[in-house]
Image: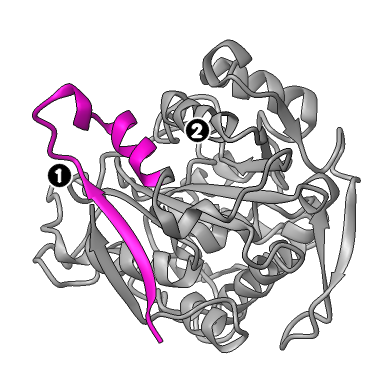
Amino acid sequence: MQSKVYMFDLHVAEKKNNKQNKLKKLMEIDDFKNIFNKDDITAIKIHFGEKGNDGYIKPTYVRTIVDKLRENQVKPFLTDTNTLYTGMRKNSVDHLNTAIYNGFAYSVVNAPIIIADGINSQNYENIEINKKHFKSVKIASDILEANSMVVMSHFKGHVLAGFGGALKNLAMGCAPAIGKREQHEVWPEVIEEKCVACGLCIENCPKNAIKLIDNIANINLEKCIGCGECVNVCTSDAIKMDWEVEIRDFLEKISEYAYGAVENKKDKVLYINFLLNITPDCDCAPWSDHPIVPDIGILASRDPVALDKASLDLVNKQKGFKSSKLKSNFKSGEDKFKGLNPKIDNEAQLIHAEEIGLGTRNYNLIEI
């Protein structure tokens, strides 16, 4: 059976069809009306962006969703969880300051921000799922306690997942630091003969887990969080991971955590993917690189698997920018995220999510 995925493109010729008004129309689709009930406390799961990053979803788009929910007497709040790595979103105080710095102030978005896993990422519950990799997963308590949810995801590349969309936003974004660590259990290894001792991996490691010993990078796996940033920045391909086993397991773990994040909500979640400014890196980076393809549009569905699959297909239909980080696959129809990270099976997270019953890859794209 196909899941419905709704899409509007970016062609605008008059005020009534600007992006904000198109988002309003999206929220008025009959298929979405029964998701939210009067007095629902509704989590809007969003990524606030790291300081220095400007690829995240615009606060004005979030305001449009907030106002539509308020019209229906719903009580929305914006939320995310604290990061595993060292940065400007490691604890709730820094996280809130970063969100406001990036434009998510109450006066702009018309809703409060609640960091769902508490000040130091200790506010979570174990949710039983009984899947391949996890019997239970750790989900932030304030997300669990919400009656319904809107998951707003910036669709873009990712060094380990291939791409990040609704599934990754659920999996990493709804988990406390300890849950992120459970998903990230992939371990890099240095190929000594290729290491040129340039120090880029040391400069970019968020946990200071790498140092030079006899002019060769050495990774302290007790400190390592498996984020893959060293692999991403190494210009001599001197750091490798087990792409066949560990990375596939990582992608399947993402799917299982995503399943746990919405286990208690079932038909009470709306997913919206923004295929704008499709960058090669996650919004967790303190920068935003050149987009890999042109802007495409905004998609919405009640099925996160169908939504991510449709988003992936639309990205791959585009011609890639040769001025971007793409290494290959510039032609229409070629896998753009494999053009960034050729060793990653980009469909693995979707396949496993379908297998465990989170959704289907079979979709009907409806243009509005």
Residue 68's disc number: 2
Identify the image quadrant of the N terminus.
bottom left
Query: Residue 124 in the image: x percent, y percent?
Result: 88, 52
Q: Is residue 162 left or right of residue 182?
A: left
Q: How many marks?
A: 2
Q: Visible in this render: residue 165?
A: no
Report the magenta residues as a range: 1-26
**At 66% across and 28% down in the image, what residue appears?**
88
> Which residue is tagged 1?
323
**At 52% across and 21% down in the image, what residue appears?**
102
Residue 315 counted in the magenta span: no
Query: Residue 72 in the image: x percent, y percent?
Result: 58, 35
Task: Please tell me how crowded label 2 is: few (under 14), some (14-19), or many (20+) other residues with Cα within 10 Å.
Answer: some
- Pointer 2 or 1: first along the chain: 2
Q: Visible in this render: residue 136?
A: yes
Kind of residue at badge 2: Lys
Kind of residue at badge 1: Ser
Q: Nearer the viewer, residue 116 or 4?
A: 4
